[in-house]
Amino acid sequence: MEYQYYEFQALERPLTKAEQDYLQSLSSRVKPTATRAVFTYSYADFPENPLSVLEKCFDAMLYMANWGSYQLAFRFPKSAVNVSALESYCIDNIIEVSTTAKYVILNLEIHREEGGGWIEENNNWLSDLLSLRQALLQEDYRVLYLAWLQAEAVSAYLKEDAQEPPIPPNLQKLNAPLQSFVDWLEMDTDLITVAAKASPTKKEPKETFKDWVNSLSDKEKTQWLLEIIVGDSAIASQLQARLRQKFAKVSELSSVFSNERRSFSELRVLADTQRLERQAKEKAAAKAKRRKYLESLKPQQAQLWETIDALIARKQAQPYEQAIQYLVDLRDLAALEEDSATFQSRIRQMQTTYSNRSGLLRRMRAAKLLSREN
């Protein structure tokens, strides 16, 4: 069955009564609050363009469909964002920036060629991702790079030799909202790891807002103060963005765009190598952990054999399963001690003793404790 989930949230100001009435008119099922509205559909579609609803009423929107569509969109005041920087990451129909009379709309849409999965109606994805809007206002473009990476990975019609966009700093260390974005899209962590190797580490610059404000003209101070007093939104982020654009050093703002770019096909090859290396390390670590555990069993072998007999005597499925696990441990320990012959002798004896225990013998065969001829 098809399932679609739309969620909108207002951050800068609460919704008016007229706006809540407008949202209520879109669906009899929706129960909008002053800051949030959720629409779900199983047999119908959203009656409006969701980006238009975002522009009219909200600051953030999330959409999910169980056939593998994901959409995250933010509304920004025009004066608060660097539009040209956002456009550096754009891909037609996937990462798009549009400008209206008052706002800039950033829209990210990822459509997996292979379907999605179950969607919880009361999920917290948008709440977990809201901080990404503030990060973009602070010119942290890591989420845009990750969106490009995922689009290239899952969209069949995009070219493998597409050149990557500007590589933002600090990709090697993702904060909680960015990690939620990765989890939401079920991204390939090996691909992120190799892509992040070209990302420089950069400390957050200390922004001297007090000095910048003191450097403003009286006319600018009056204009911005009036915006705070008579405006209908919390504009702290806008004011900070304007101060950055006016006073921050150009080198600080543009350093993100100076890296040598790679094609996605190159990143995919690097990711495959990274995956093999990671899997080899994980396998070696698991093997070392297993060996350490088996060595800890050496002084307990006699006791384990007694425990196995006691479990089998209970003639129940769960005790059988536990007995099999102990037998597997003893088999692996015997191989480690190069004494498999002794272990196999005990197993043959058990097979004779419990020849009428079909459930036990079936489990022993499944665990490959019995030889083929047995």
Image (spheres, helix red, strand yellow):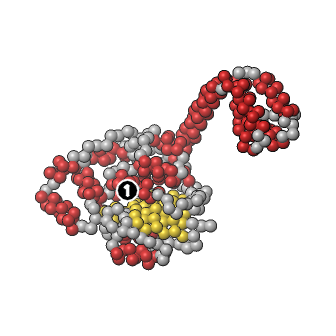
Q: Residue at the location (45% across, 38% down)?
A: 197
Q: Position of residue 359 (x, y in %)?
A: 81, 43
In this picture, residue 150 sits left or right of residue 82: right
- Quadrant for residue 14, please give it: bottom left
Give the farthest residue toward the left: 218
- Helix, strand, or loop for circle 1? helix
Type of amino acid under label 1: Arg
Q: Residue at the location (52% across, 53% down)?
A: 185
Q: Total marks drawn?
A: 1
Tell me if residue 257 can be seen.
yes
In this picture, residue 273 sits left or right of residue 181: right
Q: Residue at the location (37% across, 71% down)?
A: 56
Residue 272 or residue 143, whichever sits in front = 143
Q: Residue at the location (54% across, 66% down)?
A: 4
Q: Position of residue 363 (x, y in %)?
A: 78, 40
Tell me if residue 69 can be seen.
no
254 w.r.t. 73: above or below? above
262 w.r.t. 95: above or below? above
Q: Quarter of the image for the C terminus: give it.
A: top right
- Quadrant for residue 236, please give it: bottom left
Q: Position of residue 272 (x, y in %)?
A: 58, 40
In this picture, residue 302 sits left or right of residue 44: right
Q: Pointer 1: what residue?
A: 133
